[in-house]
Amino acid sequence: MRITPTQLQSIHQQIHQYFGDSAAVWLFGSRLDDTQKGGDVDLYVEAGPCCLLDELRCKISLEECLDIPVDLVVRQFSDSSPIAAIAKKQGQRL
């Protein structure tokens, strides 16, 4: 997994600030592969109902903290979409 402990802490702080303490987050995509270089940070978040503005604010805040582009997917706990299945099966919960 190619994120530092400091980046991990920043991710948790921002996710919980915008989506609450019950939010769960998974890292998926290229940052899971230690043999690759570069790439954005793909995050899947399960949370209660939230507004699009909070999602955008969180994405911007994450990109500023991490200094890396972030793809942020936010869904409710009951979501059963294909992206939810992929992120949770192939990703790593943080």
Image (cartoon, rainbow, N blue to C red):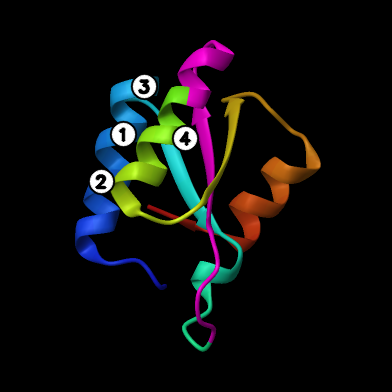
Amino acid at pointer 1? Gln
Please determine whether, in this image, residue 1 is positioned above or below residue 5. Answer: below
The alpha-carbon separation of the residues under discs 4 and 2 comes to: 12 Å
The kind of secondary structure element at disc 2 is: helix
Please provide percent x and percent y for residue 49: 54, 11
43 inside magenta stretch: yes
Badge 4 is on which residue?
A: 59
Q: Is residue 77 left or right of residue 21?
A: right
The residue indicated by pointer 1 is: 14
Eye-nearest disc, 4 or 1 = 4
Name the foreground residue: 27 vs 66. Answer: 66
The answer to which quarter of the image holds residue 23 is top left
Question: Which residue is the site of mark 3?
Answer: 18
The kind of secondary structure element at disc 1 is helix
How far apart are the two marked residues, 3 and 4, measured between alpha carbons? 10 Å
Label 2 sits on residue: 10
